[in-house]
Image (cartoon, rainbow, N blue to C red):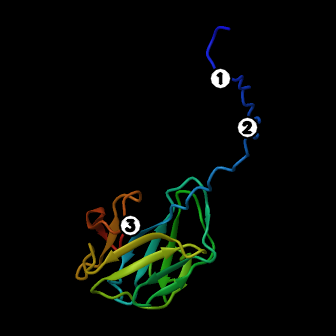
Amino acid sequence: HSGPQNSQYVPPVLLPPPPPPVDVPPPSPQPNVVINEIAWMGTTVSSSNEWMELYNPGTLAVDLTGWKLAAADGTPSINLLGTIAVQGFYLLERTDDNTVPNVTASQIYTGALSNSGENLSLTDGSGNVIDQVNAIPWFAGNNTTKKTMQRINPLVSGNDATNWQTSQDVGGT
């Protein structure tokens, strides 16, 4: 008898077919709202006329309900309301709507910004930090001329001091 000794026939192993693909929805786009401009020094009318501006460079409007803009030292702490449009701005004025002439505030807040700097965080309704500006001291702006601190590029970190400049215009842009 010829052939290898002790060989046994091994049938092929049949694997079950792979499961059908699961439809996984694409991840939701991350809201891309940023802290865009800060009048930490107030205006030529009053040092109490502080304001902050948010900007939405994204492709979707963002509902800010449940969001918060807060300083690490607790003041200000602003519970945001409303919606910020695509490529839109959201103006926060301190105390009243007379801070920025001819522009209606999106929201009024209370609580002064420190002239020596703040660590500001913008968080969504789940507490996720969407943007942060840890500027102690302030990265830009001028308390004498009342020129604001402006973000240069909304896609670059708010914690990058080189991404901020002093506004060319008194009262900001």
The mark found on residue 20 in the picture is: none
Residue 101 seen: no
> Which structural element holds mark 1?
loop
The answer to whether the residue labelled 3 contacts the one labelled 2, judged by CB atoms less than 8 Å apart, is no
Q: In the image, 141: left or right of 113?
A: left
Circle 2: is it few (<14), some (14-19), or many (20+) Cα within 10 Å?
few
Residue 117 seen: yes
Depth check, mark 1 against mark 3: the one in front is 1
Q: Find the residue positioned furthest to the top.
A: 2
Q: Find the residue positioned furthest to the left.
A: 144
Q: In the image, 75: left or right of 84?
A: left
Relative to the observer, which residue lies in front, 31 or 141?
Answer: 31
Q: Label 1 belongs to which residue?
A: 6
Q: Position of residue 97 (x, y in %)?
A: 52, 83
> Which structural element holds mark 3?
loop
Distance from label 3 to label 2 (Cα)? 59 Å
Q: In the image, 35: left or right of 67?
A: left
Q: Amino acid at mark 2?
A: Pro
Circle 1: is it few (<14), some (14-19), or many (20+) Cα within 10 Å?
few
Q: Amino acid at mark 1?
A: Asn
Distance from label 2 to label 1 (Cα)? 35 Å
| Marks 3 and 2, the one that precedes in the sequence | 2
On screen, residue 43 above or below 29:
below
The mark found on residue 173 in the picture is: 3
Residue 173 is drawn in which quadrant? Answer: bottom left
Q: Position of residue 40 (x, y in %)?
A: 35, 81
Q: Label 2 belongs to which residue?
A: 18
Q: Position of residue 9 (x, y in %)?
A: 72, 22
Depth check, mark 3 against mark 2: the one in front is 2
